[in-house]
Structure formats: structure tokens, C-alpha cells
Amino acid sequence: MTLEEAVDAVVAGLTDIRPGLEAFYEDLHVHPELGHREHRTAARVAGRLGECGYQVHDGIGGTGVVGVLANGHGPTVLLRADMDALPVREASGLPYASTARTTDTSGRQVPVAHACGHDMHVTCLLGAARLMATAQRVWHGTLLALFQPAEESGDGADRMLADGLTDRVPRPDVAFAQHVLPYPAGQVGTRAGSFLSAADNLKITVHGRGAHGSSPQAAIDPVVMASMIVVRLQTIVSRELAATQPAVLTVGSVQAGTSGNVIPETAELLVNVRTYDEETRQTVLAAIRRIVQAECDASGATREPQIQEGTRFPPTVNDAAVTDEVAAAFSAAFAERAGTAALQSASEDFSRIPDAFGIPYTYWALGCIDPDTYQNARQRGTVDQDIPVNHSPRFAPVLQPTLDTGVQALIAASLTRLAPPDRTGP
């Protein structure tokens, strides 16, 4: 049996389970849960895996779930999906749009929505897991279906690892994951090497001396200090990195003062940095510290600046050989709908899991926008304006063919390792 025949044999059952998968997806979309609170989602996932014959390990790192299906001797493959939603008020207009609200970690009432498509990831993995369980005659080895909490906060993978993930499940030989992105549904895109950026979040506090707004000579103005820092930070990417070194530096928040006629004591900046390799990352972070210190010195700051490191996401660097294998399988399964994905400036914590096991991985893009809608926007030259992106209140994957494609992609990738050798000979 060739790889293509094995994929066809497993995917043949998709027609029968499709209505149930679509209903499951819509239910998850209506009931989103924030990171580390995915209790309902995790319980439903664990229940479905158990029904399919998987050995279920739940509560890993809080709400993480892993299903293990052993099917004779052979490699072990890990498939991962993230489960958490975002504090976003959905504006998709879907009949199953979320109206959920909850209390966040600071005690505020916030809306909750699956504005990044993690509900699609969960449903695709459950579909693939079920089909693999019902077609064990065509593959050998062990399949791990891992459902991770709290990807958005960047600590879900770490919590599963800290809770003994690597000791609680068989060691995989390879790991796979996918993410919906604002490309035409039905398409899949692979990319060897760097795919997603690393991300560093910094909180910078600068200290001045407060005074009345009418007496600036009595103050050391932290607002001016912060403003000069914001401007100078923009020169790091444009003037300190080569054009061949991609990076993004964003000052997403500047907070200072409470009144127009009061010069405050402090100003706070929240900075986000995206890089693709450790050398560039260290260059940018060192430049930030140098510029902040220099501007504070130039202004006569009353105290040393405080630079606090926040959440950090690792880079996603796909193994070249594994990616080539998956790309070939996708070409066979999807023909012209398979291609090369563009370098992404978004970030993920998925790679921490295969890195902890010391195994290669690949992570690919799954298109999720109605193809006609995307094509019309492309012809108008308005893709950036008209196509909602991840985290937008209007972002919502079109149900089909996104779901079918995601299920098939996970199966095709798995069978690059789990399918038995070609038995077409005598």
C-alpha cells in the first residue's frame, strides 16, 4: 500500500463523521474558554478520545489532554492542537457566534471568542484521531493526539512540560501542528526552516520628577523621555539591522500621567519584539537597553530605568527533511492546493514540546477564508482591508472546506511516518 493509498483509506471515513465534526466545531465556537480555563473543552476532548479507544491522560499542566493510540510496532507521531480562546468580542455575524463573557485574571468582565481559530484546530485533530483509530489496518506505530492549553499566553506548553509530559507519554519521533491563517480555505502551505518568529515582551519604566504643568523647569519630564525613546527605538530595525535580517519592533502602549496640567513622576512603555534567529534577537534587545539607558541619562532621570522581561515565545523553525516529506504528501493529497507558506511574524509556543523531547517537527499553514471572498478582495487589491486576520473580532474560519482540509492534512502528515512500506509488489 502506497502512502497515497493509505491516506485515501483513512480519509474515506470522513464523509460519515463530517456532520458530527461540524456540530462539535460550532459548539466549541459558542463556548470559548480563556487559557488555563479550558475545562469544558478538555472534558469534551477527553471524552471523544476515550470513545475512540485512546488511552487518555488529562489534567496535564491543568487542562492539557493527550490521547495515546498504540497500534503495533513502528514510529510514534505527535499531533498537537491548541484549545484556548481570546478576550475579544466577536463580530463575525455567524449564527453560532460567541456571546460568552467571563472574569479575567485581573477581575475584569471580558468577552470571550475563538478569534484565532483554535476551535478549528481542536476539531480537526479530533477528526483525524477518530479516522486513524477506525483505519488501524493501514498503519503501524503509535499516535499521540495532544491538546494544549494557553497558547495565547505563551505558557501552556511549559506547564504541560513542567507537569511531566515527557514522562507520562511515549517519546515521539516527530511532531506536527497546523494553524489557520487568512488564506483561501482548502489551501495548505509548508515552509522549511524559519516559519514563525520569536517574540519578546518588555515593560519599560522611566523615572522623572513631577511638577505642575506650568513649571516644567522644576520637573524632569518622563513623558518627553518616553517619547524620545519611542522615536529612537524605531531606528533599530531601520538602521542597525541589515536588510536581510527581518525583525519587528512595536511600542504597543505608552502610559503616563492623569492630568494635562501635571507632569508625572513616571512613564511606562510596553514593547514587543519579533525576530527569527538568536543573533538578531540579542542585537535588538541590547539596542533597546542601550537606547533606553542613554535617553534616561540625557534627560537626567532620577532613577535607573526598569526593563522587565515578560512573556517570551520561541521561534518556530521547521526541520527541512520532515517538511519536505510532508510537502510531498500534501502535493499528492491536495495537488495545486498545496504550496509554500510565507514567512510569518506571528509567534507560537508549540516548538517547546518537540524541543523538550529532542525531536524534529514541522508546522504548516491552513487556509480558512472563503475562496471567492479572498479572490474578489485580491482582484480589488483590498486583501489587507477586507480579509479579517487572526485576533480580529471579525475573524472566523469558513467551516468548509477548512475542516475537511485540516483533518486530511493531519492524516497525510501522520502517515508519512506511520504508513507501512509500499506493498504494491508481489
Image (spheres, rainbow, N blue to C red):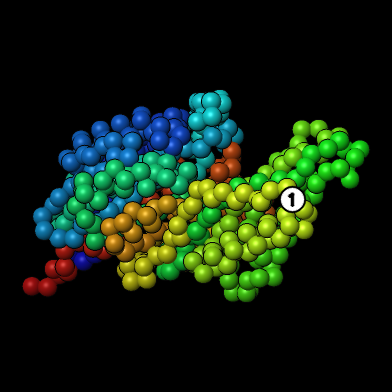
Is residue 381 visible in the rendered image? The answer is no
Is residue 172 visible in the rendered image? The answer is yes
Residue under the image location 51 percent in, 65 percent down: 276
Q: Is residue 3 left or right of residue 240?
A: left
Residue under the image location 19 percent in, 42 percent down: 54
Dot 1 crowding, Cα within 10 Å, few <14, some 14–19, many 20+:
many
Q: Position of residue 136 (x, y in %)?
A: 16, 51
Instruction: Kindly identify the amino acid type of the residue bearing the numbered disc 1.
Output: Ala
Q: Nearer the viewer, residue 95 or 164?
A: 164
Residue under the image location 46 percent in, 30 percent down: 30
Quarter assignment of residue 237: bottom right
Find numbered disc 1 in the image and state the secondary structure of the residue it sits on. Answer: loop
Quadrant into which the C terminus falls: bottom left
Q: Is residue 376 left or right of residue 212?
A: left
Q: Nearer the viewer, residue 35 or 279?
A: 279
Q: Position of residue 420 (x, y in %)?
A: 16, 63
Q: Is residue 274 left or right of residue 5?
A: right
Q: Farthest residue in the right direction?
A: 214
Q: Is residue 18 left or right of residue 9?
A: right
Residue under the image location 58 percent in, 57 percent down: 273
Q: Position of residue 29 (x, y in %)?
A: 45, 34
In the displayed structure, 189 sits above or below 205; it is below
Quadrant into which the N terminus falls: bottom left
Marks counted in the figure total: 1
Q: Position of residue 290 (x, y in %)?
A: 65, 62
Q: Nearer the viewer, residue 334 or 157?
A: 157
- Residue at which label 1 appears: 301
